[in-house]
Image (cartoon, helix red, strand yellow):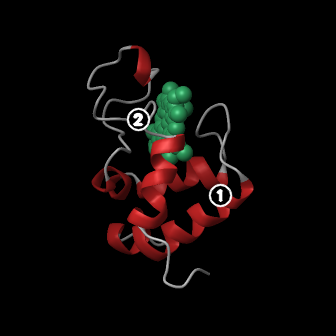
C-alpha cells in the first residue's frame, strides 16, 4: 500500500487518461471516430465519471480485463488501479466489492 494512499491527482487521472479517455470522453459527445462506439454516457475524463461508473470500470478493467479492448495497462498499473479504486473511488461511489 502506498502511504499516503493513491488518489485521483497522484495516480487515477493519469491512468484513466492513458487507458480509457481516448474513447470514453465528454470531448466526444457523439459517436465520431475517437469514441469508437463506446457508450455515450460512459466517460472517464473526469473524476465524476469514474465515480459514476466505478463498479463497471473496475470489473471490465481489473476482473474481466477486456477494457481497454486491446489491452494495455502494465501489471504495475493494474495493481495501483486496484489500490486506488479500493481506497478512494469505491468509498466515494458507495460501492462495496
Ligand atoms: C478503443 C476504445 C476503448 C477504450 C480505450 C476503452 N473502452 Fe470501454 N468501451 C469501449 C466500447 C466499444 C464499449 C461498448 C462495448 C462493450 O461494452 O464492450 C465500451 C464499454 C465500456 C463500459 C460500459 C459497459 C459496461 O461493462 O458497463 C465500461 C464501464 C468501460 N467500457 C470501461 C472502460 C475502462 C475503465 C477503460 C480504460 C481502462 C476503457 N473502457 C477503455 C471502447 C473502449
Residue 75 location, x and y as percent? Answer: 73, 56
Left-right relation of 84 to 48? right
Q: Is residue 88 above or below residue 24?
A: below
Residue 67 picture quarter: top right
Q: Is residue 21 above or below residue 52?
A: above
Q: Is residue 43 above or below residue 58?
A: above
Left-right relation of 71 to 21? right
In-front residue for pair 72/89 = 72
- Most extreme residue toward the top, as rendered? 32
* The residue carrying mark 2 has its beta carbon less than 8 Å from ligand 1: yes
Residue 51 picture quarter: bottom left
Q: CA distance from mark 1 to mark 2?
A: 19 Å
In-front residue for pair 91/96 = 91
Residue 71 location, x and y as percent? Answer: 68, 38
Residue 34 location, x and y as percent? Answer: 42, 21
Q: SS for tag 1?
A: helix
Residue 2 location, x and y as percent? Answer: 58, 80
- The residue at 47%/72% (across/down) is 96
- The residue at 47%/48% (across/down) is 16
Q: SS for tag 2?
A: loop
**Residue for badge 2:** 24
Which of the numbered marks, if any, corresponds to residue 19?
A: none
**Residue for badge 1:** 78
In-front residue for pair 28/57 = 28
Q: Quadrant of the N terminus?
A: bottom right
- The residue at 47%/52% (across/down) is 14
Mark 1 or mark 2: whose residue is earlier in sequence: 2
Q: Residues within 10 Å of mark 1 (few under 14, many from 20)?
A: some
- The residue at 45%/44% (across/down) is 17
Q: Residues within 10 Å of mark 2 (few under 14, many from 20)?
A: many
Amino acid at each position: 500500500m502506498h502511504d499516503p494512499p493513491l488518489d485521483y491527482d497522484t495516480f487515477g487521472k493519469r491512468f484513466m487518461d492513458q487507458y480509457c479517455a481516448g474513447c470514453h470522453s465528454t470531448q466526444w459527445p457523439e459517436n465520431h471516430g475517437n469514441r469508437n462506439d463506446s457508450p455515450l454516457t460512459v466517460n472517464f475524463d473526469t473524476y465524476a465519471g469514474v465515480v459514476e461508473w466505478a463498479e463497471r470500470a473496475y470489473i471490465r478493467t481489473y476482473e474481466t480485463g477486456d477494457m481497454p479492448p486491446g489491452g494495455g495497462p502494465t501489471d504495475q498499473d493494474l495493481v495501483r488501479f486496484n489500490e486506488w479504486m479500493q481506497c478512494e473511488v469505491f468509498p466515494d461511489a458507495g460501492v462495496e466489492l
